[in-house]
Every structure is written in C-alpha cells, then in structure tokens.
Image (cartoon, helix red, strand yellow):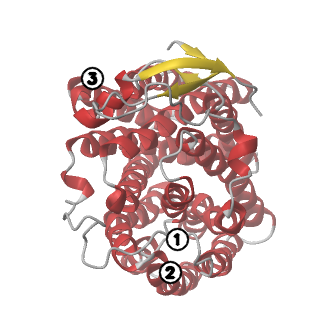
Amino acid sequence: MESTVTSTSAHSEGPGSDPTRRTEQRPGYGQLLRTRGAWTFLLPGFAARQPFAMLIISIVLLVQHTTGSYGAAGAVSAVTGVSMALCAPLGGKLADRYGQRAVLVPGVLLHSAAALTLTVLALSGAPLWALFVAAVPTGASVPQIGPMVRARWSVVLRDSPLMTTAAAFESVTDELAFVFGPLIATALCTGIAPQAGLLTEAGLTLFGGLLFAAQKATQPRPSRDGRGGSGTEHPSALRVPGVRVLAVTFFGIGTVFGGMQVSLAAFTESLGEPGLTGVLYGVFATGNMLSGLAYGAIAWKSAPQHRLLASYVALAVTASGLWAAQSTLVLAGLGLLVGMCVAPTLVTGYTLVEHLVAATSRTEAFTLLTGAVALGQAVAVTAAGQVEDHFRTGTGFLVPLAGTTLALLTLVALRSRLVPPARERAVARGVGHRQSVAVD
C-alpha cells in the first residue's frame, strides 16, 4: 500500500469551478482535536463506550464461574451478541430519524436493569434457559456509542478532509477502550467477585450514556420522516451493496475478538494464571491502537477498497498462527501482530461508509458494521467455547482463522461493490497538488 505523509489539495473538475482553488490541507490529530465542540462529546463518549469492551468478557467469566463450563458461558454471551447485532441497526435507524438522545436515554436504563437481572440469575444458579432470556434484552439495549460519535464527527467536520483522520481516531479510541476494558473486567471478576465486572459495566453504561445523551449541540439533526434536506428519500443503509460487503468483512473481525477472548481465558486458566487473560487481550488491543494511530497519520495514495483488501489479507495470515502457539510469550507476540492488522481494516471500512452512504443514513450504516462485529463475536465465543470444552486448549483459536478466511474470500469476490459512486470518483480524479505537512 503506497503512502506518504502529505496533504492533499483537490479541486472539482465540474463546470464553473475554480481550478486554482485548493481545499483545506489534511492535518493530523492535533487539529482534529481542536475542532470546535469535539470534546463535548468525546469525553462522555469514551466513558460510555468503555462498558462495550467489558460486556462479553464479564459475562464469560461470570457464567463460567457459576456453571463451570466455557460452552455455557460462550452460549450466554453469544445470545447477548446476537441480540446486539440484530437490534443495533434498528437503534441506529431510530437515532437517525428521531435523534440520538431519544434512543439513548431509554436504552441505557433498560440495559442497566437487564444486566443486573442477568447477574442475579447467574449467582442464584438459575437454569441456562433463564440466562438466555435475560441475555436478550442485555444485548439488545447495548448503547451504540461508537457509531453515534462517528455520526457526530460528520456533523462538526461537514465532509472536511479530516474525516479520514477522525475515522482513524475513533478506531484508536475503540481500541483504547479494548485495552482497558478487558483488563478492568478481568481484574474485577478475579480479584473482587465474579459479578463485579458485569455490575461495573452496567453502572458505567448508565452514567456515561446519560452524560453523552445530554450533549445536544453536536448530535445529528433528526430526519423524522426519513428524508434529507433536499426532500429526497434515502434508502436503508442495508440496501447499499457495499455496506453488505463491509458487514461480512466486519463479521470476520468479530470472530477474531470473540475467539480470542474465550481462547485466551481457557489458555491462561490451563496455566493457573487466569489474571493473564486481560493482559494478553490488552497486548492484542494495544497493537490495534498503535497501528490505528499510525494509519490515521498517513495520507494514503491508494484507493480505500484496495487498502481494505491488503489489510484483510494480512489479518487472515497472522490469525492463522494463533492456534499453534504453545507459550505465553509467543501468543502475546502473535496477538500483537493480529491487533496491528485489525485497525487498518476497521478504519478503512468506516471511511468507505462516508463515500457509499447518504449522510441521513450513516448512523444506521455505522451500527450495521458494529452489529456485524458483535454477531461475529457471538458466533465465535459459542464455537470457541465448544471447541475448548471438547478438545485441547488452544484449538479455539481456529475460530478466528476460519472467520477471517471466509470473510476474505467474500471480500475478494465482491470487492467491486466497494467502489464509490460516480460522483465520488469524479472528485477523486480532480486530486492534484500535494504539499507536505507536519503530522501532530
């Protein structure tokens, strides 16, 4: 993937355009964070998205403790993930239509109550079917803070060249949450009580979600009737072929997250060091975060769909070695490499949404991709849990290998659907002058 740390200036080739006019330079993270109004939603957004990284691992550790089975733990967390995947796009669509606040406030209240109910049932030795019932509203009501923050960037930046940098920054923020989330959840569950992780997740969701919802100035304007400012009705994001391809791609990434969470927990337990689960997963997330930072600081020359394919090949190759790791050090090194391949894929996928989907449907599109990750995670924790229960420790790592391979084959076969519409390509052909800039 050819790249350069430069600034791109473009001009439109359309009639009446000024060929000497240059758009704003593409700066680094420093100017992005100086965007007016950004911090009003970034800080509460970070607090509100932290629980998302704690939820699945907290459920796995709680249910495994109360039932003694990774298969049962994986099944309950899978129900949670499937419910989240199915309901996230609906939540995004409702947020586009009625506003984020209208969706968030009842959502965080329901989620906190459902997570508390699941905790009580697990500790009381309730049958597995009862845990499944409680897991449904727990997953369905997970607030989709990440997609909502991305939609707010679209409002404050208004198609600025900084949008790619913002997409990278959001990926880094997500991974920062995934560095601390599993560490916090594991420390709480193993050091205090098995239920401490899920209870903390519910409390943070309530506090952070309500605080984020209170920031009205930066939320996207509700469409109400599903129409844009021009009065033209925009179709559902799911009807865009490229979004469906991206959903399959993100599903494969979800299998990496879910498969690694369960398999790392089983691996560290076999060593008698369950507290290492959060550390190893933190190494994986750190690789993701660092590569995301580097990726966002580069002005890429190649088309985003080409970068997506290249990064996904690297992800599938590195994930293939996880199952063969026999030591903590080797597993940590491989996890770091896998994490470094995830961020470029996520950033590029979210960047493509900006070109493929109308502004009035972007929250829905972002939540579709987030839901695809959750669905992949749900399938992976179930499959990895069953494999870890019936075969040798570490075979659960075959799940990320299978998931990324299948998604890669789909991406290769349908990559033409990721090409932006003709209007976007016309603008791209007008790209000309490049000027070096300092990266903050």
Depth check, mark 2 against mark 1: the one in front is: 1
Indicate the position of residue 262 as horizontal and vertical percent values.
Answer: 54, 48
The answer to whether the residue labelled 2 contacts the one labelled 1, judged by CB atoms less than 8 Å apart, is yes
Residue at the spot x=62%, y=61% of the render? Answer: 54
Q: Earlier in the sequence, mark 2 or mark 1?
A: 2
Q: Earlier in the sequence, mark 3 or mark 2?
A: 2
Please rate how many residues cluster around mark 2, counting C-alpha atoms within 10 Å: few if below 14, some from 14 to 19, many from 20. some
Give the label on residue 53, or none: none
In terms of secondary structure, where does tag 3 sit? helix
Residue at the spot x=68%, y=74% of the render? Answer: 204
Classify the position of the C terminus by image quarter.
top right
Q: Amino acid at mark 3?
A: Val
The answer to whether the residue labelled 3 contacts the one labelled 2, judged by CB atoms less than 8 Å apart, is no
Please rate how many residues cluster around mark 3, counting C-alpha atoms within 10 Å: few if below 14, some from 14 to 19, many from 20. few
Q: Residue furthest right?
A: 191
**Along the line of sight, which residue is nearer the eye, 310 or 62?**
310
The answer to whether the residue labelled 3 contacts the one labelled 1, judged by CB atoms less than 8 Å apart, is no
Give the label on residue 219, or none: 1
Is residue 96 visible in the rendered image? The answer is yes
In terms of secondary structure, where does tag 2 sit? helix
Residue 367, above or below 26: below
Residue 106, above or below 255: below
Please rate how many residues cluster around mark 1, counting C-alpha atoms within 10 Å: few if below 14, some from 14 to 19, many from 20. many
Indicate the position of residue 103 as horizontal and vertical percent values.
Answer: 44, 80
Which residue is under mark 3?
412
Residues at marks 3 and 1, CA–CA distance in whole angstroms:
36 Å
Q: Amino acid at mark 2?
A: Arg
Residues at marks 3 and 2, CA–CA distance in whole angstroms:
39 Å
Give the label on residue 101, or none: 2
Q: Earlier in the sequence, mark 3 or mark 1?
A: 1
